[in-house]
């Protein structure tokens, strides 16, 4: 879709800190993360919501989300992850995306209030990208 920023990231025409690019989808750092290392996972095809995703693509997409949840935890030394998805309401970009947010005990995240932060520099974002990508290479959860 021409005006979709996530489609442009998938196509490589809009820059992003890409963690992985697979046939099932692309994962990249959120530019306004809840916590640093917050990853968005999107299917390659433009679909607005989960119910629009072809049934054959659901399994591979969620396998990728599952691998990213493990990689974020391992790569960043997080205590766990919060995995979430909005469909239409509160969906800032109308392209299906799963949030994989690193969590630590006492991090202050409560309910669905998501405070946002920023990376101090592109170098810091690249460091988080690299840590997650390296951990992802060790997660064969198929």
Image (cartoon, rainbow, N blue to C red):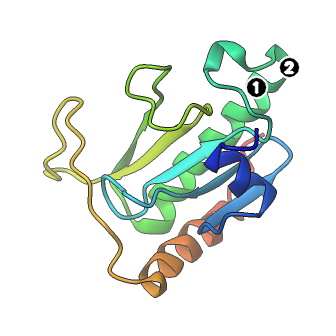
Q: Looking at this view, name the residue that lies furthest to the bottom.
A: 123
Q: Is residue 27 above or below residue 56?
A: below
Residue at screen point 75% across, 64% down: 13
Residue at screen point 36% across, 64% down: 36
Q: Residues within 10 Å of mark 1 (few under 14, many from 20)?
A: few
Q: Secondary structure at mark 1?
A: helix
Residue at screen point 80% across, 40% down: 24
Q: Nearer the viewer, residue 120 or 127?
A: 120
Q: Quadrant of residue 137?
A: bottom right
| Residue 135 percent coordinates (x, y) | 60, 66
| Residue 136 percent coordinates (x, y) | 65, 61
Q: On the rendered structure, is 115 left or right of 124?
A: left
| Number of numbered discs | 2
Residue at screen point 55% across, 71% down: 129
Marks 2/1: CA–CA distance: 7 Å
Q: Is residue 36 above or below residue 43?
A: below
For disc 1, the marked residue is 59
Q: Looking at this view, name the residue that lies furthest to the front.
A: 3
Q: Is residue 52 above or below residue 92?
A: above
Q: Quadrant of residue 116?
A: bottom left
For disc 2, the marked residue is 56
Q: Is residue 114 above or below residue 53?
A: below
| Residue 6 percent coordinates (x, y) | 64, 47
- Quarter of the picture containing the C terminus is top right
Foreground tag (2 vs 1): 2
Q: On the rendered structure, is 83 left or right of 20?
A: left
Say if mark 2 contacts mark 1, CB within 8 Å. Answer: yes
Q: Residues within 10 Å of mark 2 (few under 14, many from 20)?
A: few
Q: Nearer the viewer, residue 64 or 55?
A: 55
Q: Secondary structure at mark 2?
A: helix
Q: Which mark is residue 40?
A: none
| Residue 34 percent coordinates (x, y) | 31, 52
């Amino acid at each position: 879709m021409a005006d979709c920023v996530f489609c442009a990231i998938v196509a490589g025409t809009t820059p992003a800190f890409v963690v992985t690019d697979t046939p099932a989808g692309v994962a990249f750092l959120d530019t306004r993360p809840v916590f640093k290392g917050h990853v968005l996972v999107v299917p390659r095809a433009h679909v607005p919501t989960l119910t629009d995703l072809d049934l054959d693509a659901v399994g591979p997409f969620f396998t990728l989300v599952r691998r990213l949840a493990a990689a974020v935890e391992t790569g960043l030394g997080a205590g766990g992850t919060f995995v979430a998805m909005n469909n239409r309401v509160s969906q800032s970009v109308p392209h299906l995306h799963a949030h994989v947010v690193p969590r630590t005990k006492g991090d202050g995240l409560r309910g669905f209030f998501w405070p946002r932060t920023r990376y101090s520099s592109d170098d810091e974002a690249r460091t988080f990208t690299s840590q997650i990508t390296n951990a992802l290479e060790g997660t064969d959860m198929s």
